[in-house]
Image (cartoon, helix red, strand yellow):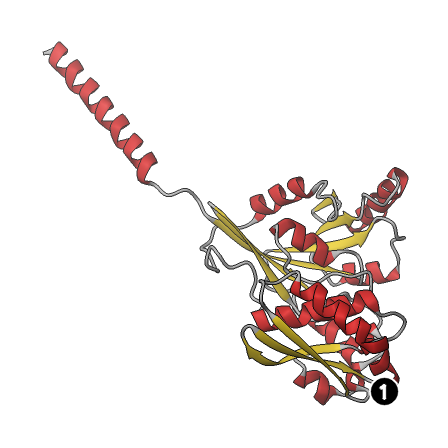
């Protein structure tokens, strides 16, 4: 009888182990998904960082302030996680209604997300602008010290020491340009992301439309080729989309700026068109038109119409 009971108990244990093994096989792994807003002063490398983390060009970049004018979402999808990065305009002291609108868009991206990342420039002193932005953020935010590839070691240490006074959750020195430190940052973001579903299809990398992306590529090249006050006065929008033919309108604020954007014998526009086509599929024809919309960035109705 004892032998029979032992056999029964052993059989029950084996059955239990088989059941547990079966559960482990059939039970789905935890899936994490989170929204990550990236904020900071202009030209600290927010867009470059998101492009690096997503492994794709999501947003245009340049060394000019106020490059980003929209909230742009970049989607990084992995087997068991999806992170949605929200790129925001640089927060600055506004001089125009457009500047005020961009600041508001950046601030609007802070509430309701899972993680807030404040990006600072390792090569630039931690100043009043950084402190102002930090005052708007929750204590659970993290600080990302970017451009460490350009900074000296003592600059990085100084920036980490300065930002530590904010008492935020964590601090990461990185280089969006080289990717250094971004793997550690990404691992942290994945750990902090809550359990949740996929919000975007596996093959979607951004919420930006193709039209808006092409218009932004044109503006990116104009930012690279023009200087002084001209970059801030430029807006771009698609006016005709009959693939593969695309017509893009370039708006400036003054007649004198129109000549700068066109260039001698159309040289600037030719360079812009060539650079944009190189980033798109072969066979695309891009037509660029330049128009004057006087003082558009000072006129709320025009700002609204342009989608800013």
The spot of residue 201 in percent (x, y) is 46, 59
Is 242 rendered above or below residue 135?
A: below
Tell me the residue that label 1 is attached to.
255
Q: Is residue 197 left or right of residue 12?
A: right
Write the residue at 77% across / 86% down.
296
Out of 65 and 282, give the one closest to the viewer. Answer: 282
The spot of residue 188 in percent (x, y) is 62, 43
Locate residue 126: give its quadrant. Answer: bottom right
Q: Is residue 108 left or right of residue 254?
A: left
Out of 306 and 120, give the one closest to the viewer. Answer: 306
Q: Quadrant of the N terminus?
A: top left
Q: Is residue 205 left or right of residue 71?
A: left
Q: Is residue 206 left or right of residue 162?
A: left
Write the residue at 85% across / 87% down.
255
Residue 178 seen from this side: yes
Write the residue at 44% across / 44% down.
30
Is 51 rendered above or below residue 212?
A: above
Is 158 rendered above or below residue 99?
A: above
């Amino acid at each position: 009888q004892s032998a029979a009971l032992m056999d029964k108990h052993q059989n029950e244990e084996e059955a239990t182990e088989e059941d547990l093994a079966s559960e482990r096989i059939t039970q789905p792994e935890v899936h994490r998904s989170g929204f990550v807003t990236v904020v900071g002063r202009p030209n600290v490398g927010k867009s470059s960082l998101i492009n690096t983390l997503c492994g794709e060009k999501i947003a245009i970049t340049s060394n000019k302030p106020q490059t980003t004018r929209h909230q742009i979402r970049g989607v990084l999808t992995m087997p068991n996680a999806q992170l949605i990065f929200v790129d925001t305009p640089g927060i600055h002291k506004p001089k125009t209604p457009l500047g005020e609108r961009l600041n508001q868009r950046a601030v609007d991206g802070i509430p309701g997300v899972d993680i807030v990342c404040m990006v600072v420039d390792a090569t630039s002193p931690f100043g009043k602008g950084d402190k102002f932005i930090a005052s708007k953020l929750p204590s659970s935010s993290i600080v990302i010290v970017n451009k460490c590839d350009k900074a000296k070691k003592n600059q990085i240490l100084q920036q980490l020491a300065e930002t530590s006074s904010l008492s935020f959750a964590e601090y990461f020195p990185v280089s969006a340009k080289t990717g250094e430190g971004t793997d550690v940052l990404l691992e942290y973001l994945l750990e902090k992301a809550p359990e949740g579903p996929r919000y975007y299809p596996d093959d979607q990398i951004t919420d930006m439309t193709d039209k808006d992306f092409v218009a932004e590529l044109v503006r990116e090249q104009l930012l690279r080729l023009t200087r002084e006050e001209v970059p801030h006065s430029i807006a771009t929008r698609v006016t005709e989309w009959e693939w593969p033919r695309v017509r893009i309108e370039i708006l400036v604020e003054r007649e004198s700026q129109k000549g700068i954007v066109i260039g001698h014998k159309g040289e600037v526009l030719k360079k812009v068109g060539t650079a944009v086509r190189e980033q798109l599929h072969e066979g695309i024809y891009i037509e660029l038109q330049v128009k004057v919309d006087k003082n558009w960035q000072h006129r709320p109705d025009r700002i609204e119409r342009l989608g800013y």
